[in-house]
Image (spheres, rainbow, N blue to C red):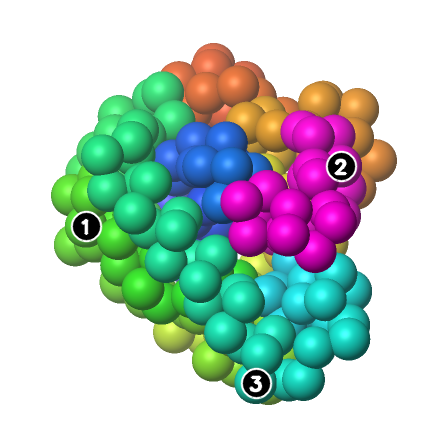
Amino acid sequence: MHPRSGAALLFDIDGTLADTDPLHLEAFNRTFEPYGHHFDKARFALELQGKANEAIARRFVPDLASDQQIAVMAGKEQLFRDLARTQIHAVPGLFELLDLADASGLPMAAVTNAPRANADLILDGLGIRHRFRALVIGEELAHGKPHPLPYLEGLRLLGATAAVSVAFEDSRTGIASATAAGLKTIGIRTSLAHGDMIAAGAAISADRYDDAAVLEFITRVVSVA
């Protein structure tokens, strides 16, 4: 692979680098069941996945004061981290793709709506923090996903160009953010089906990074002809 000038790969973290969605689902259910909410996988994917904690709290515990909403969501994230410390597994083929990008000199960034502590836990748990030249935390910006700003910031930090770069996402919110930033996006099917991802704006989808269609798509977008 011979990357074009300005080419890069940008990855969401939760559900994209690691299949953490089942852990988030468990943490959300433990957190919100006292408030009368229960989520199955389909409802999680539609109403929670990829969304900022502030927006989730406003929707599901609207009667709480803002400081109480923050505390509820902080408790949920701590519960997730407790679960994740022994249960983080990379999506199949991830390490091989990271090796290929490094060998080709293709820069990479991680772009997430998750709190920094969660991002740190996953990147360090997988041992891949050093692979990424930039880490963008959506809640630390003026706008998180689905706004394009997190991916625009990732591109800026890498000195990359959207037209010759590829994003990887697992949620409707993330796909919306990446495509709005001008990125061609591959959906990783840890939670959503192929049709849902294409409807959200993904160019293709795959269950794993070593799918031949993934490498072919990346090569077509980022490589010199």
Where does label 2 land, which residue?
43
Q: Is residue 55 left or right of residue 72?
A: right
Residue in view at x 70 percent, y 56 percent: 35
Q: Residues within 10 Å of mark 3 (few under 14, many from 20)?
A: few
The CA distance from mark 3 to mark 1 is 30 Å
Q: Amino acid at mark 2?
A: Arg
Q: Which residue type carries mark 1? A: Asp
Q: Is residue 40 left or right of residue 68?
A: right
Q: What residue do we see at 34% from left, 22% from top?
A: 93
State the residue position of label 3: 67
Does the rendering let one see residue 52?
yes
- The tag on residue 124 is 1
Q: Which range of residues does the magenta coloring cover?
A: 28-50
Q: Which mark is in front, 3 or 1?
A: 3
Q: Quadrant of residue 146?
A: bottom right
- The answer to which of marks 2 and 3 sits earlier in the sequence is 2
Kindly state the secondary structure of the residue where label 3 is placed: helix
Between disc 3 and disc 1, whose residue precedes? Answer: 3
Asked where in the image residue 1 lies, by quadrant, the reply is top left
Instruction: Using a 10 Å C-alpha cutoff, classify the residue at mark 1 as few (fewer than 14 neighbours), some (14 to 19) or many (20 or more).
Output: few
* Horizontal and vertical percent position of residue 123: 26, 50
**Horizontal side, residue 156 vs residue 93: left or right:** right
Q: Amino acid at mark 3?
A: Asp
User: Could you tell me which secondary element the residue under label 1 belongs to?
Assistant: helix
Residue density around tag 2, few if under 14, some if 14–19, many if 20 or more, within 10 Å:
few
